[in-house]
Structures are given as C-alpha cells and as structure tokens.
Amino acid sequence: MYVEKTSAPARKPVTVPGLKAMKADGRKIVMLTAYDASFAAQLESAGIDVALVGDSLGMVVQGRASTLPVTVDDMVYHTAAVARGLSATLLVADLPFMSDRDVPSAMEAATRLVAQGGAAMVKIEGAGRICEVITALAERDIPVCSHLGLTPQSVNKFGGYKVQGKTDAAADKLFADAQAVEAAGADLLVLECVPSALAERITRALSIPVIGIGAGVACDGQVLVVYDMIGLTPGKRPKFSKDFLAGRDSIPAAIQAYADDVRAGTFPGPEHSFS
Ligand SMILES: Nc1nc(=O)c2c([nH]1)NC[C@@H]1CN(c3ccc(C(=O)N[C@@H](CCC(=O)O)C(=O)O)cc3)CN21
Ligand SMILES: CC(C)C(=O)C(=O)O
Ligand SMILES: [Mg+2]
C-alpha cells in the first residue's frame, strides 16, 4: 500500500506565554536580530526562538552613526520583510526613536508594526514615563518587550555606548526600573550592557523572562545583532558579541552554533560580559 510521506513535524510556534514557560522550566531563550526575509529564513531553520527587527538596522543596514534617524516606515518595511521569512519564530520589532513619545503616538506606531509588519510584540526603551505607554499597549493586548540598561536611543544623554548600572545608586535605579516595567505590563525585558551580578539579581527577581546582551550568562536568554555574530560588522565589535562564523563554513552553521551555545549556557563567557 502506498503511504503518503508525511512532512517532518513543524516546530511549535513560539508564543508569549511559551516564553514565560521557558523561564519557569529553565530553558534558555535564543533571540537574534534580522532585517530581511533571507536572514529570517535562516533564523527559522536554526530554531531561533525570537527574531528581533532592531532599530540597529539604522546603523548596520543604513550606515548611520546611531539608531536615532530610524523611522516607523523603516521599521514597518523591514518587519514585513522578516515576517515573510518566519513561521514558528516569534517576531518582535523595535519602536523607533520618539515614536513612543506619548500614548497615542506609541499606539499608532505599534499598530502599524503589528498590523502591517506582522510583529507579535513591540520593544520599547526605558522606564519612568514610558511605563504609561507600556500599560496602554498591554491593556490593548499588544505584547511589550522592555529594554533597559544601555538604551541606544539615549546615546546623547549617556555620552556614548557605555555600561550602565555600575554604581550602587545606578544599580538600585535599574533594579527599580525593571520591577516597574514588569508591573506596568511588560512581557519580556532586554537588559543591555549591565554588570553580570546585577543582571542576575534582576533575572531572579522578575517573573517575566530577561534577555541579556552584554549582561552575563545568568539571564533567561540572549540576543545579539546578527551581523556582529557573523563577523560582518566593520571595525571594533562590541565586547559582548562573538564571531560565530570564525572556524565554521557557513552562516547557517554560525547561527546554529550561537543557538546551541546559548542553550548550553556556554555563551556568553566572562570575556563577553561586564563586571
Ligand atoms: N553592530 C551593532 N551591534 C550592536 O550590538 C548594536 C548596534 N550595532 N547598534 C545599536 C546598539 C549600539 N550598541 C552598542 C555599541 C557599542 C558598544 C560598545 O562599544 N561598548 C563597549 C563598552 C564600553 C564601556 O566599557 O562602558 C565595549 O567595549 O563593548 C555597546 C553597545 C548595541 N547595539
Ligand atoms: C541590540 C538589540 C537589543 C536592539 O535593540 C537592536 O538590535 O536594535
Ligand atoms: Mg534597538
């Protein structure tokens, strides 16, 4: 009898509640940026949990000096391209500079990223008055990823891309901000360039998953800029990133190695972290 060949079981779609279950089970969350459909398809094949259309595209795709010139139109364009390359991987898109200036503006930008871009979640830098925006989105059931620590949209206030939360006072402020964004309704938190011990303390204190970039190995997951981890970034790469293509023969192999190392807890090492 002829038995029709069944296709391999599709990977179960990654969902927002699914991410919380991963934290509860101690399964590491693997997140990576993507800006187009071809990279998105590679993230999908490697079983990356979360794809981030980062406003870093302003720097790595558009060649600008910061993320500040990126527009909502730019983000919608790249988010829609990435969405076409994905099936099970959860899609998150950054709200660009000042699109979150007030609740109506943030609602409009988030609506476009979800409805036109196909994002499942939007990412917002900061706490304080941004908590009001987080709550407004959460109340309309748009999942929110907060981003604290080195928030690149604050580069002019910080005076450069520097490690945050180094003094006791700054650490206490960051810890309080992390609790505030969770209370405001955030579903996920990215911590960028934060001393490892502080990131670990925040990760333990919060019930939402914490994704680190330059925040040590104790976070619930990791994120990197994809061009950094395949050695494409010209000049000095941030200390927290690693060239996973070095010693491997393809971009898919590099992406797979990154996913494997994050899940095994072998990336990041102390050399990719700050104390
Ligand atoms: N290619 C790329 N990778 C990124 O990770 C990234 C971007 N672009 N653009 C947007 C922001 C900017 N980011 C950056 C950029 C530089 C450093 C950096 O050079 N950090 C220093 C630490 C400085 C300190 O010790 O205070 C380092 O040595 O890594 C960090 C984050 C992260 N994001
Ligand atoms: C580096 C990550 C967290 C980001 O926000 C981006 O790529 O824009
Ligand atoms: Mg960003």
Image: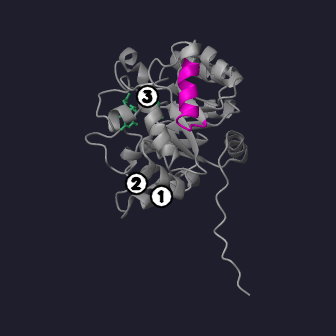
Classify the position of ligand 3 by quadrant: top left, top right, bottom left or bottom right: top left
Q: Is residue 46 left or right of residue 14?
A: left
- Residue drawn at x 36%, y 64% as measured from the top left: 249
Q: Which residue is mark 3?
A: 73
Near-viewer residue (177 or 152): 152
Is 156 in front, or is 97?
97
* Furthest-left residue in this view: 235
Q: Residues within 10 Å of mark 3 (few under 14, many from 20)?
A: some
How much space separates mark 1 and mark 2, taking CA atoms? Answer: 7 Å
* Mark 1 → mark 3, Cα distance in angstroms: 33 Å
**Amino acid beneath label 3:** Asp
- Residue at mark 2: 244
Residue at (38, 62) in percent of width and height: 250
Q: Position of residue 96 (x, y in %)?
A: 46, 25
- Residue 260 versus residue 49 in the image, above or below: below
Residue, x 33% and y 49% (percent of image)? 231
For image coordinates 42% across by 40% down, the residue present is 240
Q: Quadrant of residue 6?
A: bottom right
Q: Amino acid at mark 1?
A: Ala
> Distance from label 2 to label 3 (Cα)?
31 Å
Q: Earlier in the sequence, mark 1 or mark 2?
A: 2
The percent position of residue 106, horizontal first and vertical second, equals 55, 19
**Label annotation for residue 257:** 1
Q: Which residues are magenta?
A: 106-120
